[in-house]
């Protein structure tokens, strides 16, 4: 089941559900690109970069399954990318380092998103989200 993905429709909400696999960031980018295209939003590049980083973090530090959603913020209509996983760890921006070979993904997310954060789930795990500019 490691390489399996599934798109689930619940009402108007569409979810990409993926077990831990190296193909997950690419599938998430494609999913977000299609979501934007279906809603007439031309530039999905920033949202695709954000979802790629969030899914990669979930793969490296979380627990499967990974669930990707894109919703609109009710207050301003902007897209919000959400990545859910079952891990208890909370993502954090690491201090700058010229020698580190990883650890810059959330720096990118923080720079590209209007705002971002993590919300714990009652059943365990978390949702890491980022609001995208249009």
Image (tube, rainbow, N blue to C red):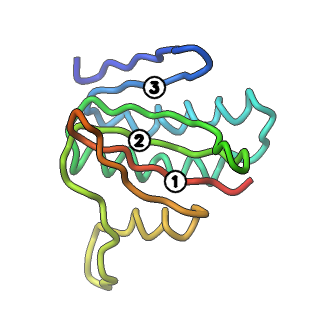
Q: Residue at x 21, y 50 (%)?
A: 61
Q: Residue at x 65, y 31 (%)?
A: 35
**Quarter location, residue 62:** top left
As drawn, is 115 to the left or to the right of 34? left
**Quarter location, residue 77:** top right
Residue closest to the eye, 26 or 40: 40
Cα separation, mark 2 vs mark 1, equals: 9 Å
Mark 2, secondary structure of its residue: strand
Residue that badge 1 annotates = 130
**Quarter location, residue 40:** top right
Neighbours of disc 2 within 10 Å: few (<14), some (14-19), many (20+): many
Residue that badge 3 annotates = 16
Report x, y in % for residue 75: 69, 49
Neighbours of disc 3 within 10 Å: few (<14), some (14-19), many (20+): many
Cα separation, mark 3 vs mark 1, equals: 16 Å
Mark 1, secondary structure of its residue: strand
Disc nearest the viewer among 3 and 1: 1
Report x, y in % for residue 100: 26, 76
Q: Residue at x 65, y 29 (%)?
A: 34
Mark 3, secondary structure of its residue: strand
Report x, y in % for residue 116: 49, 59
Cα separation, mark 3 vs mark 2, equals: 9 Å
Residue 92 higher or lower than 12, as above or below = below
Quarter the N terminus occupies: top left
- Going from N to C along the chain, the mark reached first, 3 or 2, is 3
Residue that badge 2 annotates = 83
Report x, y in % for residue 24: 38, 34
């Amino acid at each position: 089941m490691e390489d399996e993905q599934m798109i689930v429709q619940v009402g108007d909400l569409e979810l990409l559900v993926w077990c831990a696999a190296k193909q997950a960031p690419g599938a998430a980018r494609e999913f977000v690109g299609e979501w934007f295209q279906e809603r007439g939003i031309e530039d999905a590049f920033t949202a695709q970069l954000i979802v790629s980083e969030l899914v990669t973090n979930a793969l490296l530090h979380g627990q499967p399954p990974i669930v990707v959603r894109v919703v609109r913020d009710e207050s301003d209509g902007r897209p919000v990318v959400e990545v859910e996983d079952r891990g208890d760890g909370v993502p954090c921006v690491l201090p700058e380092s010229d020698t580190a070979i990883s650890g810059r993904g959330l720096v990118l997310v923080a720079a590209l998103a209007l705002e971002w954060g993590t919300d714990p789930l009652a059943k365990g795990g978390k949702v890491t989200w980022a609001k995208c500019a249009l």
